[in-house]
């Protein structure tokens, strides 16, 4: 075993100490980063198998495990190693561990990854332990770990060095495990409901399907400017036209060159689906069933904590038309207002600053955002949106200024957006041309009409309900995360020099 003389020759700088130990290990054992090492079981499997092992009992079972060293006591006699599934204590003593294995202990630092073969026992204090027979250095860590119990206190550093955040923060680790569980739950629910998953392009020659600023790139071979996807909507509708399936969905990454906030990231995950021969009310039922199933999967109940609130994903959710919600909040009856001028006048009279060219529907939507959104804490479907801001939805029968559209809100956040999809090709073209003219008037000169989509709609798309769900925000709610960056493994951030 290495003696105190060896210890005293090492530098006082922690990083330099590790570099010196690496050099010594290479001289003593040769390969410090071996390509091959096989466990007989994970820590989680070990914990489960010996769950009922009594205290102060030693088995004759020899196992091989591996993990990162998180703590070391009594000069390495006791070490805790962690893998993705749990912690196991390692015991190295002269009565049970050969000299060759114990000679490695002074070279092992917290953060190193080791493999251990030994006999399973449970200590008198009830700690599941392996009496080490062999110890193998698998990875020498050249940087110290953050202090285990406090982790990374700098929140920006947590996002920049997510590997350290997860390594030292059990809440972060659990949250990303739950994210995976939620994504799997969405996929499983949709497939069980008869939806077929497809993949649509992320590079678009014409951007559309939502109103957003795109990221632009260039394809060298095709000599073509292209855009990162802002929404998969138009391709998914073309899939519906094809007759491949009546129920299609995609869990997709979208990219929008816009602001960053606690609820916005330039790249984000959505689940978007289209259901032939269904309408927006069928989609409302789908959302409620999906949300309820995810809450049960993560929490085992439809009620769960978020901050200082208790959320309930038990359907049915509250359903309220937008004009009714605005009337209740402000007293303004938009359905009784006939013209754009009257709408602007009513809004101004109530103290709202509206633009001089805003339409009836834009005034209604603005006041809703100002006065109603913040009150929607429990899950709610807001229905009957203005047609002015909803170019892909069918009109409400008897009220042509409104469309069969709803957005699902919770904690005052929009989680989902759904339509009874417009499938009249002439009306679709008229609305898209109007939307294009508005975009050009705002200075968006690169915006183009998607003629390939319009050609597909001319072929005939069945009546359908469509839905987009902001998966990251949904995960925020289900995992009690205050910021979208807490649920995105590697969120967008400024350069260190900025």
Image (cartoon, rainbow, N blue to C red):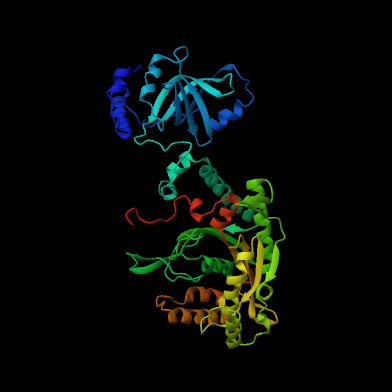
Q: Please tell me which residue lies in front, 299 or 369.
A: 369
The image quarter containing residue 35 is top left
In this orientation, does residue 284 appear?
yes
Image point (40%, 55%), residue name: 493
Query: How far across and down, in percent of the image, does residue 337 sit?
Result: 65, 85
Query: How far across and down, in percent of the image, does residue 68 sit?
Result: 44, 32
Q: How many marks?
A: 0
In this orientation, does residue 278 appear?
no
Image point (29%, 22%), residue name: 8
Image point (53%, 33%), residue name: 86
Image point (59%, 85%), residue name: 345
The image quarter containing residue 17 is top left
Left or right of 266 on screen, residue 344: right
Q: Residue furthest top?
A: 95
Left or right of 238 on screen, residue 402: right
Q: Residue furthest right?
A: 316
Above or below for 497 versus 60: below
Quarter of the figure with the N terminus: top left
Q: Please tell me which residue lies in front, 191 or 410.
A: 410
Left or right of 251 on screen, residue 448: left
């Amino acid at each position: 075993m290495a003696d105190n003389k060896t210890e005293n020759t090492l530098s006082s700088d922690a990083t330099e100490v590790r570099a010196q130990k690496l050099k010594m290990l290479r001289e003593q054992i040769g390969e410090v980063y071996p390509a091959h090492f096989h466990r007989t079981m994970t820590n989680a499997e070990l914990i489960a198998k010996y769950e009922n092992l009594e205290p102060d009992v030693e088995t004759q079972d020899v196992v091989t495990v591996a993990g990162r060293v998180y703590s070391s006591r009594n000069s390495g006699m006791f070490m805790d190693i962690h893998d993705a599934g749990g912690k196991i204590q390692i015991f190295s003593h002269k009565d049970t561990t050969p000299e060759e294995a114990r000679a490695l202990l002074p070279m092992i630092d917290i953060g190193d990854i080791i493999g251990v073969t030994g006999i399973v026992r449970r200590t008198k204090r009830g700690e599941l332990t392996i009496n080490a027979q062999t110890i193998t250095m698998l990875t020498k860590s050249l940087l110290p770990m953050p202090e285990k119990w406090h982790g990374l206190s700098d929140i920006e550093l947590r996002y920049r060095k997510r590997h350290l955040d997860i390594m030292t923060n059990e809440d972060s680790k659990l949250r990303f495990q739950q994210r995976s569980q939620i994504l799997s739950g969405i996929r499983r629910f949709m497939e069980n409901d008869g939806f077929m998953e497809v993949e649509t392009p992320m590079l678009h020659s014409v951007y559309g399907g939502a109103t957003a600023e795109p990221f632009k790139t260039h394809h060298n071979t095709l000599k073509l400017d292209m855009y990162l996807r802002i929404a998969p909507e138009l391709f998914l509708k073309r899939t519906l036209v094809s007759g491949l399936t009546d129920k299609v969905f995609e869990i997709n990454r979208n990219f929008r060159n816009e602001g960053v906030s606690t609820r916005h990231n330039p790249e984000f995950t959505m689940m978007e689906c289209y259901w032939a021969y269904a309408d927006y009310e069928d989609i409302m039922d789908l959302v409620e069933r999906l949300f309820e199933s995810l809450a049960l999967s993560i929490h085992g109940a439809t009620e769960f904590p978020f901050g200082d609130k208790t959320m309930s994903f038990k359907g049915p959710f509250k359903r309220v038309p937008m004009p009714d919600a605005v009337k209740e909040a402000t007293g303004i009856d938009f359905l009784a207002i006939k013209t754009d001028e009257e709408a602007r006048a009513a809004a101004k009279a109530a103290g709202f600053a509206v633009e001089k060219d805003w339409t009836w529907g834009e005034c209604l939507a603005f006041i809703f955002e100002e006065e109603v959104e913040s009150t929607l804490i429990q899950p709610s479907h807001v229905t009957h949106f203005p047609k002015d801001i909803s170019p892909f939805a069918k009109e409400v029968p008897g009220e042509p200024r409104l469309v069969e559209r709803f957005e699902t809100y919770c904690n005052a956040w929009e989680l989902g957006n759904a339509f009874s999809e417009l499938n009249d090709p002439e009306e679709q073209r008229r609305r898209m041309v109007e939307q294009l003219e508005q975009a050009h008037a705002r200075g968006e000169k690169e915006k183009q009409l998607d003629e390939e989509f319009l050609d597909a709609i001319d072929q005939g798309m069945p009546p359908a309900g469509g839905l987009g769900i902001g998966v990251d925000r949904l995960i925020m709610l289900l995992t009690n995360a205050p910021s979208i960056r807490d649920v995105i493994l590697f969120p967008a951030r400024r350069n260190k020099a900025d």
